[in-house]
Image: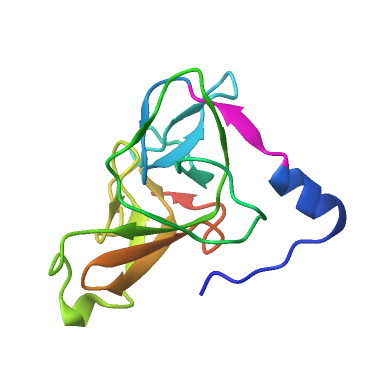
C-alpha cells in the first residue's frame, strides 16, 4: 500500500516541494496552493486542487505513508511538505464493510467525502479510498488533476 518510486529530477521536485501555511491547517486535511503559492485548505467549491496532506513532520523519503490521527494543527507560517500519502484514523465503525475500497473525493474545507462532486463549478478529484471501517488512505497520485464539473 502506497509503495512508489521516484528517480532523478522528478524525485527532487517532490522531495523539495515545501510550502508555507497561509492559515492554521488541521492534520489529516488536504491542502492546495493559493495565488501566493502558500498552503490553504483544498476545497471542491473554491476550487483548489489538493496537492498534499497535512502531516506533522517530514517523511524520510517521498512515497512513504504517514499514519496519524487528526488532532494536531500545523500553525500558519510554518512550512510543510506536500506529502502525497497518509493513513487517517477514524472512529471504529465510521465506514461500513460495504464501503471498504470505495473512492474518496475532495470535499469542503480540506475534507474528503464519499460523495462524488456533481455541482456545477465544483472540482471533482479522487483523493483516496476507504481502507477499513476505521481508516481511510489518502493517495493524491490517484487523480492528480481532477475536473471542474460543467
113 to the left or right of 30: left
Magenta stretch encompasses residue 60: no
Quarter of the figure with residue 13: top right
129 to the left or right of 22: left
Residue at 64% x, 34% y is 18
Nearest to the observer: residue 119 or residue 42: 42
94 to the left or right of 67: left
Residue 42 visible in image? yes
Q: Is residue 147 above or below residue 21?
A: below
Residue at 72% x, 67% y is 5
> Which contiguous range is marked in magenta?
16-21
The x and y percentages for residue 63 are 62, 60
Nearest to the observer: residue 44 or residue 141: 141
The x and y percentages for residue 49 are 49, 42
Q: Is residue 42 above or below residue 149?
A: above
The x and y percentages for residue 120 are 32, 44
Nearest to the observer: residue 66 or residue 125: 66
The x and y percentages for residue 62 are 65, 55
Magenta stretch encompasses residue 20: yes
Quarter of the figure with residue 3: bottom right
Residue at 79% x, 53% y is 10
Residue at 48% x, 51% y is 147
Nearest to the observer: residue 59 or residue 5: 59
Amino acid at each position: 500500500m502506497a509503495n512508489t518510486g521516484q528517480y532523478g529530477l522528478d524525485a527532487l521536485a517532490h522531495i523539495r516541494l515545501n510550502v508555507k501555511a497561509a492559515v492554521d491547517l488541521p492534520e489529516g486535511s488536504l491542502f492546495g496552493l493559493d495565488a501566493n503559492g502558500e498552503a490553504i485548505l483544498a476545497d471542491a467549491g473554491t476550487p483548489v486542487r489538493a496537492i498534499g496532506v497535512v502531516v506533522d513532520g517530514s517523511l524520510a523519503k517521498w512515497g512513504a505513508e504517514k499514519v496519524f490521527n487528526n488532532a494536531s494543527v500545523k500553525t500558519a507560517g510554518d512550512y510543510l511538505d506536500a506529502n502525497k500519502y497518509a493513513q487517517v484514523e477514524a472512529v471504529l465503525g465510521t465506514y461500513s464493510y460495504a464501503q471498504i475500497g470505495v473512492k474518496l473525493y475532495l470535499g469542503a474545507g480540506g475534507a474528503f467525502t464519499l460523495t462524488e462532486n456533481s455541482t456545477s463549478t465544483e472540482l471533482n478529484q479522487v483523493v483516496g479510498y476507504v481502507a477499513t471501517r476505521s481508516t481511510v488512505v489518502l493517495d493524491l497520485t490517484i487523480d492528480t488533476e481532477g475536473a471542474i464539473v460543467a
